[in-house]
Image (tube, helix red, strand yellow):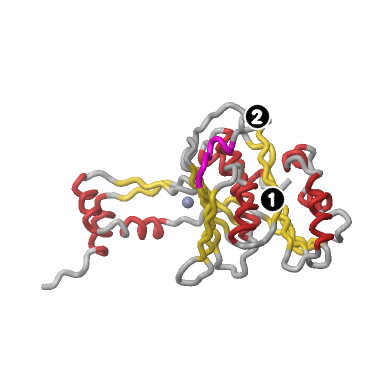
Amino acid sequence: MDDYMLRASAAEGNIRAFAATTGGVVEEARRIHSTSPIVTAALGRLLTAGIMMGSMMKDDEDRITIKIDGDGPMRGELITADRRGNVKGYPYETDVILPANAKGKLDVGGAVGKGTLTVISDLGLKEPYVGSVNLVSGEVAEDIAFYFANSEQVPSAVGLGVLMNHENTVNCAGGFIVQLLPGCPEEISSKLEDRLRGIDSVTNFLRRGDTPEDILRFILQGMNPVITDRLPCRYFCGCTRTRVENALSAVGAKELRSMIEEGKPVELSCHFCGKKYIFSREDLESLLRQAEPQKKA
Ligand SMILES: [Zn+2]
């Protein structure tokens, strides 16, 4: 199944909903970062949330960045998404291994620990909008739901799941976000709560090959769901040598000079896709000339 996400509305516009299948995206992230299963699950859940939250933005240039910082062995992770299904991300530690949790599942909460979830919405304004909440469990879905309720005052149900194969590659991944819009009548919200109570985990849907359509149909049964958009999604990093050069110039003339004095080429790799960029001594010298203000004669 190719990765895609759906946007839907239900209950005569009182509910909006999103669902995605992201196995390809998460497997690509696993391949790039060589992550252990717990880290793959943590990163895959956040990438999946990012795809759906990215699609909530209004303009093509808008970007959303979601960052988790925790005191667990994984320390955290960061993802960035646009509104067209492109997402990329990285974990702070790639190789965490922990025993299964009490439910016999990958202990993502234990790997993340206690900390914060921060959402940075870059809406083309000078200052991006930043919202931050404490982590509820570090299991990601609960933390995103808590963020919506507290930072954006939108009651939301969030499910995110990643299922691994025995050889630690990704079998499937996906998730949903269902939100009550302002003024939603009590009877609709309690009906939705009833439906959500019937869901144990997203992985149960994915395991039996359910599509995002199936997931939304199940959750929104009896509430007239209407699918409004279907959007392909992918892991995509748009890094270029020019952008890396700009980042390198930004370290300042003093740092550049000390790199040049070391006499060795500098190798930088992109955090998101692992692509390597090599800067020779001559490259560094030319960056230094650009970084230094013109000397007065
Ligand atoms: Zn890159």
Which residue in the protein does label 1 denote? 158
Which of discs 1 and 2 lies nearer the camera? The answer is 2
**Looking at the image, is mark 1 or mark 2 earlier in the sequence?**
2
- Against 90, residue 118 (above or below) is below
- The prevailing secondary structure element of the residues shown in magenta is helix
Q: Are circles 1 and 2 on residues that touch, CB within 8 Å?
A: no
Range shown magenta: 108-115
Q: Residue 109: within the magenta? A: yes
- Against 247, residue 39 (above or below) is above
Circle 1: residue type: Val
Whether residue 65 appears in this view of the structure is no
Tell how many labels. 2
* Residue farthest right in this picture: 222
* Residue farthest left in this picture: 297
- Against 40, residue 89 (above or below) is below
Q: Position of residue 214 (x, y in %)?
A: 81, 49
Please give the label number shown on residue 102: 2
The crowding category of the residue bearing disc 1, from other C-alpha atoms within 10 Å (few below 14, some 14 to 19, many at least 20), is: many
- Image quarter in which the C terminus is found: bottom left
